[in-house]
Image (cartoon, rainbow, N blue to C red):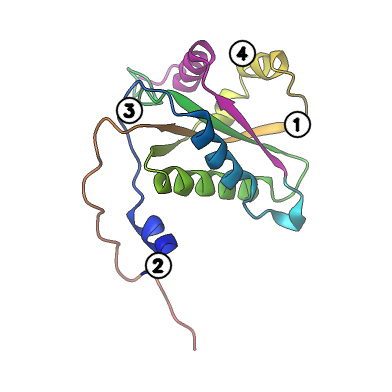
Amino acid sequence: MNETMQTMLSRKSVKSYKPDQVPQELLEQIIQAGLYAPSGRNKQAPIILAVTNKEIRDQLSKINAGKDPYFRTDPFYNAPCVLVVLADKTVPTYVYDGSLVMENMLLAAHSLGLGACWIHRAKETFETEEGKALLKNLGIEGDYEGIGNCVVGYPEIIPAETKPRRENRVYYVK
């Protein structure tokens, strides 16, 4: 099996992180992988908000958790870095394009020996007044929708073995 296939088949979501910050050069590689994701008509609608500032990261975590009682603690699992993918809603394929950016970054993080996890509610985060104000304060203008939060860091706990895939999910038409 080649290295790319091995990376895809062995990646798991990490849900516990050490506090150590990820070196900038590794973050840049992960971000570059995201920027090279395919996009409809090569519109490249998604943008990436790379958050390593603890204050902003904690603010995003709080907005993301909202009033949901499920999130009694940090929904970002204490990861020191959050790569938020937002996409231009005027592009018809923006959700798909942003999802591909997320997948590329998850695979890139794993290939670099880091842990990562897709955290939902980016859409809801940036629909709030606080989320909109945060983007404005960062100089991000446009009709963007949050696609996902890719949390990245050094795993505190290595995830268990990969679970077997469910059967009967492929239908061949020959």
**Marker disc for residue 143:** 1
**Mark 3 residue crowding within 10 angstroms, few (<14) / some (14–19) / many (20+):** many
Please identify, in this view, whether the residue under mark 3 or under mark 4 is nearer the observer.
3
Q: Residue at x 37, y 22 (%)?
A: 20
Disc nearer the start of the sequence (3/4):
3
Q: Which residue is mark 2?
A: 2
Q: CA distance from mark 1 to mark 3?
A: 32 Å
Task: Mark 1 and mark 3 in contact? Answer it, CB < 8 Å.
Answer: no
Question: Which range is magenta?
Answer: 45-69
How packed mark 1 is, by other alpha carbons closer than 10 Å (few <14, some 14-19, many 20 or more), is: few
Amino acid on which disc 3 is placed: Tyr
For label 4, the residue is 130
On the question of residue 140 being in view, the answer is yes
Separation of marks 4 and 1 at Cα, in angstroms: 16 Å
Give x and y (percent) for residue 169: 38, 68
Mark toward the start of the polypeptide (1 vs 2): 2
Q: Which residue is mark 3?
A: 17
Residue at 32 percent of width and 17 percent of height: 72
Secondary element under disc 2, as helix, strand or loop, is loop
Q: Residue furthest left?
A: 160
Q: Quadrant of the N terminus?
A: bottom left
Question: Marks 3 and 4, how far apart in space?
Answer: 26 Å
Mark 4 vs 1, N-terminal side: 4
Q: Residue furthest top?
A: 55
Q: What's the amino acid at mark 1?
A: Asp
Q: Quadrant of residue 134?
A: top right
Q: CA distance from mark 1 to mark 2?
A: 40 Å
Q: Is residue 162 left or right of residue 169?
A: left
Q: Position of residue 103 (x, y in %)?
A: 51, 48
